[in-house]
Image: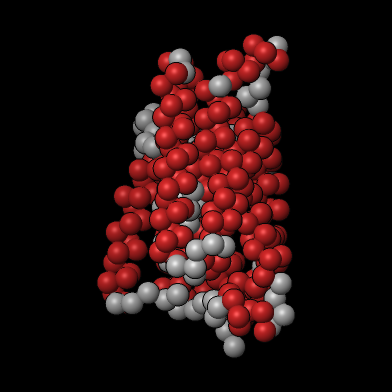
Amino acid sequence: MQTPKTYRSSFVLLLTVLVIALGINISLGSVSIPFSETLHSVFGGTLDNTAWDYIIWNYRVPKAFTAILVGAGLSLSGLLMQTLFRNPLAGPFVLGISSGASLGAAFLIMGSATLSSLFGFSLVTDVSLAIVSSIGSFLVLLAVITVASKVKDTMALLIIGLMFGSISAAIVSVLSYFTDAQKLQQFVYWSFGSVGNLSWHQLGLLFVILIIGIVLGILSIKPLNALLLGENYAKSLGVNLVRSRYLIIIATGLLAGGVTAFAGPIAFIGLAVPHLTRQIFNTTEHRVLVPAVLVYGAILMLICDTIAQLPSSAEVLPINAITSILGAPVVIWLLVRKRKMVF
């Protein structure tokens, strides 16, 4: 039986790469700070240059940990969706979960002027944005699941998910048409995706949301393994399908909705990292895949963020563009090299 112990050396290597990627990400940026000084500050030392200390602890470290959480959360949500629907094209974006989260954020950001005048105070806060985005992702995914109970064909389900995403995008377009330039610009920049705008307080909120989602994902490992062989087989093992589906839905909604709320709609990671992990580990055992996708996703996001921030430059590229440009060729190369998809 394939267990995490079988892949112990692989996990040690992955964690080592994660630490290296984290160190490189923190050490690089628009302000040139010597690597030795960065390490000294990270390990509790006080730098003579207080500005460097401030930059490291208030910008670079939160950004690096945000990248880790975003990569891990999106990767696990993609794995959950692909297994639940037994469809290699499933993911937070394909089935409309992130589109629903974006719709919730659009309602709050672009409708905040009218709502704020009614209530007498601003409604756009860290907590409200996370809650509204999560609710949006839940509603879209629940709608997909409801329709899925009437449709057994997986390709039809995929099309239905895309239609829900299209409906969400259409509503966002209508809101964009009627909103003012300032709110529209705020939403557009949010939609580019970024891991560099979170404070320690916001990072703490994201951490709590994703930890709950990850725990629910871990609790779903047995049903996920059973679902790979079909619902009838899962029932024969005593798996409560209704309970398991809702558990996976809640986990995915928290992961995808939380990430989208705080970092914007980041593409590619949720769809591709599970495939990368299966190709490299050559297994479908979720006791291996769940921790592996968490680490792989974190590493990939750290690498993409390091490239996006253009070291020694004040310019920061949209993280969405980097994740797709860097990751898509890797997935294509792996699939061509393996000549088949492990699923």
The residue lying toward the viewer, choosing from 206 and 122, is: 122
Q: Which residue is drawn at 29% across and 77% down?
A: 339
Q: Which residue is drawn at 63% across and 18% down?
A: 115
Q: Residue at x 46, y 15 (%)?
A: 180
The residue lying toward the viewer, choosing from 65 and 153, is: 153
Q: Is residue 187 visible?
A: yes
Relative to 278, 138 lies left or right? right
Q: Is residue 267 above or below residue 116?
A: below
Furthest residue toward front:
150
Colour scheme used in the picture? Answer: secondary structure
Q: Quadrant of the N terminus?
A: bottom right
Q: Where is residue 138 in the image (x, y as percent from the top left)?
A: 61, 47
Relative to 266, 5 lies left or right? right
Displayed quadrant of residue 306: top left
Q: In this view, does 255 lie above or below 217?
A: above
The residue lying toward the viewer, choosing from 126 and 199, is: 126
What is the total number of numbered labels drawn onto the structure image?
0
Displayed quadrant of residue 178: top left
Q: Where is residue 252 in the image (x, y as percent from the top left)?
A: 60, 55
Furthest residue toward bottom:
1
Q: Position of residue 136 (x, y in %)?
A: 59, 41
The residue lying toward the viewer, choosing from 201 and 254, is: 254
Q: Quadrant of the C terminus?
A: bottom left
Q: Residue at x 47, y 39 (%)?
A: 168
